[in-house]
Amino acid sequence: MQGLFFEDLSVGQSAETTKVVTANDVEAFAAVSGDTNPVHLDEAYARTTTFQTRIAHGMLSGAYISAVIGTKLPGPGAIYLSQSMRFRRPVKLGDPVVTRVTVQALDDKRGHATLATVCQVDGKTVVDGEAVIMVPRKGA
Amino acid sequence: MQGLFFEDLSVGQSAETTKVVTANDVEAFAAVSGDTNPVHLDEAYARTTTFQTRIAHGMLSGAYISAVIGTKLPGPGAIYLSQSMRFRRPVKLGDPVVTRVTVQALDDKRGHATLATVCQVDGKTVVDGEAVIMVPRKGA
């Protein structure tokens, strides 16, 4: 169940997922987080906001980023050190969120990888930011 | 369902929640995010890692931060602009996570609030970082 090792990584390498956000996903995220803000759960309320319809929690896109890192690039064995996120556009129910993680820099001395982390819907960036990960070495 | 307005905020104001992380929470977070990294789901695998037991997803703490912002400070009506997080220590199953959000700076011109966001277990910081929120004004 070991993911990629530090030696397997190179700048420019990337991995991605696509997830269509459903009402069930938003309700499950509200339940597990406790974030019951009505802009996520109540269509009548959401229609009164600038978004005009229910939107997904920004941190659900964060969860998709974490999923790509935790399962694909670099995958199990890596340790998440930090994440920054800018929430640029809302994600609506039914939107297909493409989450892409790309190796941006490798710190050989410390075994750290810096990843560009981007979520897009229909080619437009909804979230961008950066993750730093400690990646195990072969035979370490 | 309106939360606090920009005029209701002052530097130093804070809000918090306490959530005990259960196996169900971690499994629900894995299901909704797609992050099935075995360090979160497989106790036998987790025992072989540096953590020695299953740990919660770092982004679950991020979800708790989002919940305090989305329901308490400032609550509904605010717009999440950005979040940074440093993952400092693991969160284990059964850990009570205290998530505290504190107003750090107010940008009156733009209506932005900068919040310090910290999650602690037994008085030790597990995640820290910063959020920037756009907060509606009264009568705007």
Image: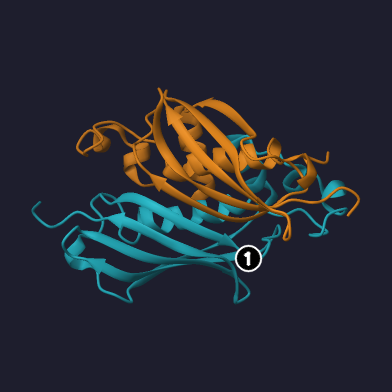
Chain colours: A cyan, B orange
Q: Residue A33 vs residue A49: left or right?
A: left
User: Where B66 sits versus A13, above or below?
Assistant: above
Q: Residue furthest left?
A: A139
Tell me which chain the residue with mark 1 is part of.
Answer: A
Q: Residue furthest right?
A: B139
Q: Residue A2 vs residue B116: left or right?
A: left
The quadrant of the image that shows the N terminus of chain B is top right
Q: Residue A3 vs residue A82: left or right?
A: left
Residue A46, image x and y in percent? 82, 51
Residue B5 visible, this orientation: no
Amino acid type of the residue that numbered disc 1 sits on in the rendered structure:
Arg
Residue A44, image x and y in percent? 87, 48
User: Where A3 sits versus B58, above or below?
Assistant: below
Which residue, given by chain and number where applicable, does mark 1 sit on?
A88
Closest to the observer, B24 or B107: B107
Badge 1 density bin: few <14, some 14–19, many ≥20, Cα 10 Å: some
Residue B80, image x and y in percent? 65, 53
Residue A54 visible, this orientation: yes
User: Where A73 sits versus B31, above or below?
Assistant: below
Q: Residue at x 50, y 28 (%)?
A: B98
